[in-house]
Image (tube, helix red, strand yellow):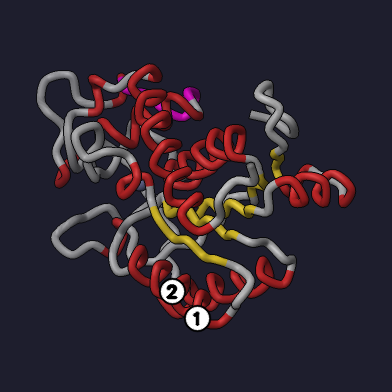
Amino acid sequence: MFGSSSESGVDWGRYERLLPREIEAIKAARSIAYLPWGALEYHGTHAAVGLDGLKAHGLCCALAAQEGGLVLPPVYVAANTIKTAPDLSFPQHSLDFAESTLIQLAKEYFEQLADEGFKVVFTLCGHVGQPHYDLLKAVAAEANQHYADTHFIATSETDLVPEDLFIVNHAALGEVALLMATDPDCVKLDRLPADRTPTLEDDAVWGPDPRTASADLGQKFIAGFITGARERIHAVYPPSP
Ligand SMILES: [Zn+2]
């Protein structure tokens, strides 16, 4: 997942890697900024702490390769991580920021991307801890009131992949399969206990057993995500005929 035009002829690219001429050409073809919003958060002994941002960035690149537009680098500033979850004890390997910092950062990202003239800002929240996720949605809703020429979407793969295919989870089957598809070197399933089913309390795994995950399954989730995400984008920004 590097750089510009995909095989399908769709113009897309990773914003930080591009020069102004390429940015302008892609934006003229499809004026969408994809903003992957991740976290640095403990995801068990078996997955990288950047899972949420890596996943969101990988999904945005796969989406942009079909839809067109520019993918920004992931934001790794999150509130309400597992570090602060009451009843759980995972004090390390998470950077937890204040909700006020999150809100301010989202406001400024949206302001800047509106100022850059994007028609759609598609924020993909890889971390759906609460109220973190609802706060980003609320800032996006506020921005929609404020900026007339830009439409802001804040969503997550959990809201876009069909429910029969994917359930909300933390470091479990869904997230791990996605990470195996986008960043296979960031998963080590053999670090999980061999003699018992992983649990939330002991292993930070919430959801179906990640040991049945595979990159193929992750690709199925990605395909479902792309269909759902494109419908969402086309509802506010139809593709030109
Ligand atoms: Zn996660």
The residue that appears at 33% across and 21% down in the rendered structure is: 217
Q: Is residue 186 magenta?
A: yes
Crowdedness near tag 1: few (<14), some (14–19) or many (≥20) residues, C-alpha within 10 Å: few
Give the SS element for disc 1.
helix
Q: Which residues are magenta?
A: 184-189
- The residue lying furthest to the front in this view is 241
Which of the labelled discs sits on residue 145, or is there none? 1
Q: Could you give the CA–CA distance between mark 1 and mark 2, rounded to whole angstroms?
A: 7 Å
* Quarter occupied by residue 66: top right
Q: Is residue 241 above or below residue 195?
A: below
Nearer-the-camera pick, 157 or 75: 157
Amino acid identity at mark 1 = Gln
Nearer-the-camera pick, 38 or 144: 144
* Quarter occupied by residue 115: bottom right
Q: Are marks 1 and 2 in contact (CB under 8 Å)?
A: yes
- The residue lying furthest to the left in this view is 196
